[in-house]
Amino acid sequence: MDDDAPNAGDYADYAHDSWNRLATETRHISTNTYTISYQYDVANRLTKLTYPDNMQILYSYDDLNRITEIKRYIDGMNDEILMDNVQYDTESLLTQFDYGNDLRASFSYDSRDRPLTIDVKDGETSFLDLDYTYDGNSNITQIVNGWRDTIAKVVNNRKLAS
């Protein structure tokens, strides 16, 4: 028997607010109960998650309802930036953000708003560098990493190689 398998009595309860948004998720695992609470602003955007250990994740938005920052409060006072310096293009496509560990993610798109590149760097050190190509039906036909290795080739929506 798998020790990680859920017990037959394990279950989750969900409560919704008056706007039918998820307000709490309570998981009953063995004899323990864990509750995650969700809070929203007047624009119906998720603004805070509170985990069972009271760790909080806070979300900030701009006037166009785009995410601008994600912070984590561990003890209710000291915050840790998880994501900030978020930038968008004129079509509101995400073009850049910084992780809290000083990594920067950058994204570029083609004229049909399909991702062309995804890069994650720490200064000049590259951790992720992907280039995408598409067929006429917008199916991804190839993903190439920064070392020019082909990660995957796809034809007729079927992966041929990786």
Image: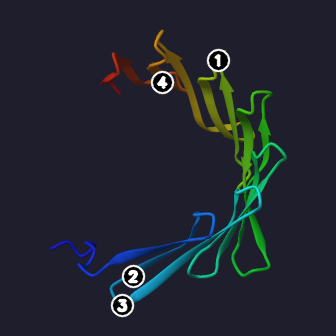
The CA distance from mark 1 to mark 4 is: 15 Å
Among the two numbered marks 4 and 3 on one chain, the one whose residue lies closer to the N terminus: 3
Among the two numbered marks 2 and 4 on one chain, the one whose residue lies closer to the N terminus: 2
Task: Tell me the residue that label 3 is attached to.
Answer: 31
The CA distance from mark 3 to mark 2 is: 7 Å
Residue at screen point 46% across, 23% down: 149
Image quarter hosting the N terminus: bottom left
Amino acid at pointer 1? Asp
Among the two numbered marks 1 and 4 on one chain, the one whose residue lies closer to the N terminus: 1
Q: Position of residue 126 (x, y in %)?
A: 64, 37
Task: Tell me the residue that label 2 is attached to.
Answer: 28
Task: Tell me the residue that label 1 is attached to.
Answer: 110
User: Is label 4 in a helix, a strand or a loop?
Assistant: strand
Q: Position of residue 33 (x, y in %)?
A: 44, 85
Q: Position of residue 13 (x, y in %)?
A: 43, 75
Q: Looking at this view, is 26 or 109 the one in front?
A: 26
Q: Looking at this view, is 137 or 22 the one in front?
A: 22
User: Is label 2 in a helix, a strand or a loop?
Assistant: strand
Residue at screen point 62% across, 26% down: 117
Mark 4 crowd level (few <14, some 14–19, many ≥20, 10 Å Cα)? many
The CA distance from mark 3 to mark 1 is: 52 Å
Residue at far left of view? 1
Asked whether, in this view, residue 50 is left or right of residue 148, the answer is right
Among the two numbered marks 3 and 1 on one chain, the one whose residue lies closer to the N terminus: 3
Q: Position of residue 15 (x, y in %)?
A: 52, 73
Task: Tell me the residue that label 4 is attached to.
Answer: 143
Q: Quadrant of residue 46?
A: bottom right
Position above or below: 136 against 98: above
Among the two numbered marks 1 and 2 on one chain, the one whose residue lies closer to the N terminus: 2
**Residues at discs 1 and 2 in contact (Cβ within 8 Å):** no
